[in-house]
Amino acid sequence: MLPLFFPIFQLLILNMLKSLILENNISEIRRLHRSVIRFAEQNRLGKELIADIRLVMEEIFSNIVQYGFEDEGRHHIAVDMEYRGGELILSVVDDGKPFNPLQASAPELDKPFEERCPGGMGIFMVTRLMDQLEYRMEGGKNILKMKKTAPPGAP
Amino acid sequence: MPLKVGSREKTPGIFVISLIGSLDTRTHGIFDDRIDMVLKGAPKLIVLDMEHLDYISSIGISSILKAKKALKRIDGKLTLMHLQPQVKKVFEIINALPSQRIFTGTRELDEYLDRMQRSITGEEPA
């Protein structure tokens, strides 16, 4: 019996996980968005949650691409998306300049919108959309892990 | 999803720009270009109709902010209309809504424009 069910079991595990390697090029956002949609559909995530994941991943990825590297070289950004036990876990690893999003300045929320400077909104949105962020620098790499409680059936 | 942008002059100096799709890192340039084009007509008011805009990221918000500031320099205004829940949520996260006039629909916009017109001509309301 076990050999018959084993491939199905493996498929179930793979559906919960999505990993991809992106290059430090803004055009890769398209591939990232497609992967988010595929991952979300495979895990039957709600529409609102899909939009949140898409936004979080776009903000983190574009921040890395725009500000993470001083050379013109090709770099890889590893993205993992996992949904397990009603918890969403997103990980992003890059070898860019050290950057801890938890220490990023917040936008000027108390100023009227039209009087603000445009920066800082993306990372701030990530901190508001995810329940937990963990950052560490290891082996010359920025490692960011983001978690969000998302019970099955959440919108 | 890509971005489609339409624009029309509703009344002299009042432009409605319709956004369809996503305003994000890949598409904000399309929006920026349309705003630049409309700005050449020295508009008094630009209304962004976001009924069919289903996604916005921070760079999209920055583009809208940039447009607002550009209009302010020529004594114009920019308002939003028909915010969809996900887009509204993003604006709420960055506390950008309290200082904004948001039209829920075309009828509200038309009523506002009527009041604007009457305040200019000095007409009594009907």
Image: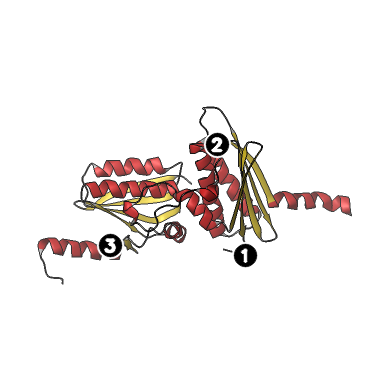
What's the distance in space between the residues labelled 2 and 3, CA to CA? Answer: 47 Å
The residue lying toward the viewer, choosing from B101 and A114, is: A114
Residue farthest toward the bottom in the current orientation of the protein:
B126
Mark 1 and 3 residues: CB-CB less than 8 Å, in contact? no
Q: Which mark is residue A97?
A: 2
Q: Is residue A111 shown to the viewer in this render?
A: yes
Single out the mark in the foreground, 2 or 1. 2
Question: In screen coordinates, is B17 left or right of A150?
Answer: left
Name the residue beneath numbered marker 1: A153
The residue lying toward the viewer, choosing from B4 and A35, is: A35
Mark 2 and 3 residues: CB-CB less than 8 Å, in contact? no
Q: What's under tag 2, amino acid-wise? A: Lys
In the image, are marks 2 and 3 on the same chain? no
Residue sitting at 58 percent across and 32 percent down? A75
Residue farthest toward the right in the current orientation of the protein:
A1
Residue sitting at 33 percent across and 46 percent down? B66
Name the residue beneath numbered marker 3: B109
| x and y percentages locating residue A26 in the rendered image | 50, 37
Q: Is residue B23 shown to the viewer in this render?
A: no
Q: Chain of mark 3?
A: B
Label 2 residue SS = loop
* Quadrant holding the C terminus of chain B: bottom left
Q: Which mark is residue B50?
A: none
Label 1 residue SS = loop
Label 1: few (<14), some or many (≥20) within 10 Å? Answer: few
What's the distance in space between the residues labelled 1 and 3, CA to CA? Answer: 37 Å
Q: Chain of mark 2?
A: A
Residue farthest toward the top in the current orientation of the protein:
A72
Q: Chain of mark 1?
A: A
